[in-house]
Amino acid sequence: MSKFNELCKFYSTARTNYFTYWHECSEFVTELLDGLMKYFDMPDDKLKFVPLRDKPEFGKSYSAKDSMHLEKDTFWYLGLLLTLCGQIKNQPEETLVLPLLIKKIDDNYVVKLGPEGEAFEIHQDNAASCPAFYDNMYDQVKNTYKDRLHKFLDGAQSERRIGFATPE
């Protein structure tokens, strides 16, 4: 085999490895969020994938794979749109943008909510059942709203870890 052909083979192998890794991570995160929706007893239309790097197209449905991009910190980044409903008649919905980071290490995945979020190591066979991670997400969202008005009125500055989606 010529040196050029060897280089082509290395390129082909590297490309195959990248796309395999991308596929494995997207499959895992899809299962992880299916488990989250069951854990929260959430309607299907209240949690969606969205890219974080590029502005999402209004009305377009994204898969996990379509939403992911790899960063220098070796994590895949993708966004989750979580739409919360008001409990009072005619109260508007609010959509939160949750940054989700994921990477695979051997047979485990490391998952975080945001770059500074707590890291959870989850075995590849447990993607659909991760109560510690689900409870962490629940607490993050709950704390976004808990005592929000009182903190604002008291002039307290709060560190926001979750963004809000704005309509087009």
Image (tube, helix red, strand yellow):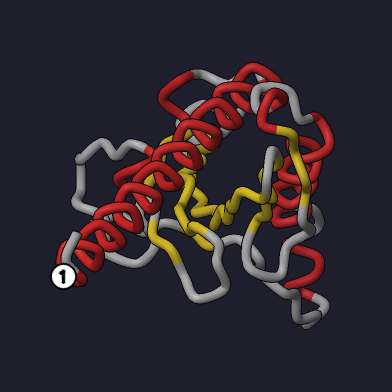
Q: Residue at x 15, y 70 (%)?
A: 4
Where does residue 11 sit, x and y in percent of width and height? 26, 62
92 is higher (above) or lower (below) than 145: above
Mark 1 Cα shell of 10 Å, populated few (<14), some (14-19), many (≥20):
few
Where does residue 53 sit, x and y in percent of width and height? 35, 67
Q: Residue at x 48, y 46 (%)?
A: 80
Quadrant holding the C terminus: bottom left
Choose between 96 and 63: the one closer to the eye.
63
Which kind of residue does numbered mark 1 sit on? Phe
Where does residue 73 sit, x and y in percent of width and height? 57, 73
Q: Residue at x 65, y 22 (%)?
A: 128
Please indicate whether residue 72 sits to the left or right of residue 156 in the image.
Answer: left
Choose between 140 and 33: the one closer to the eye.
33
As helix, strand or loop, the secondary structure at mark 1 comes to helix
Quadrant holding the N terminus: bottom left
Where is mark 1, residue-wise? 4
